[in-house]
Amino acid sequence: MSATISLKPGEHEETLYIEPRTTFDACVLRLENGVTIYDGDKVIHTFQQEFLSTLKEENIESNELYPDITLEEQAWEMAQEWFNFNVAGAYLGEYTPKYKFKDFDEV
């Protein structure tokens, strides 16, 4: 007996999501033909919060190379770099997620 998968409207079995979904599903704008469209600003902000939490857990008070930036700014830069290289820069086939930004076209 095979398991039945419950698909949302616009979703395909091949639809890809950023994991963990419990964190990043709040960033989903919509599904288009099986492609997940994310709010890119929210995704980066979510990564920023994750990095900021990690910096605080590790008791890092400032960046030795850039002592004039706050932990929030450091976390934002880390989130931007992570997103650009590991998320937006990843091509996973025709169902690769897309990202919309307030001030830019989709990535």
Image: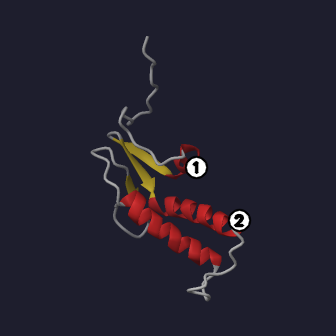
**Mark number for residue 34?**
none
Q: Is residue 68 above or below residue 104?
A: below
The one nearer the camera, 92 or 63, is 63
Left or right, residue 14 beside residue 43:
left
What crowding class fits label 2: few (fewer than 14 Cα within 10 Å), some (14-19), or many (20 or more)? few
* Placement of the C terminus among the 4 image quadrants: bottom left
Decide: is 65 above or below 47. below
Residue at (57%, 76%) from the top-left corner?
Answer: 74
Is residue 68 in view from this perspective? yes
Q: Residue at x 59, y 65 (%)?
A: 51
On screen, residue 42 versus residue 50, left or right, reads left
Q: Specify the amino acid type for callout 1.
A: Thr
Which residue corresponds to mark 1? 23
Q: Secondary structure at mark 2?
A: helix
Task: Give the mark, 1 or 2, whose residue is nearer the N terminus.
Answer: 1
Q: Secondary structure at mark 1?
A: helix
**Residue occupying the point 61% across, 89% down:** 68
**Residue 53 at x, y = what percent?**
66, 64
Circles 1 and 2 in contact, beta carbons < 8 Å: no
Q: Label 2: which residue?
A: 57
Q: Quadrant of residue 106?
A: bottom left
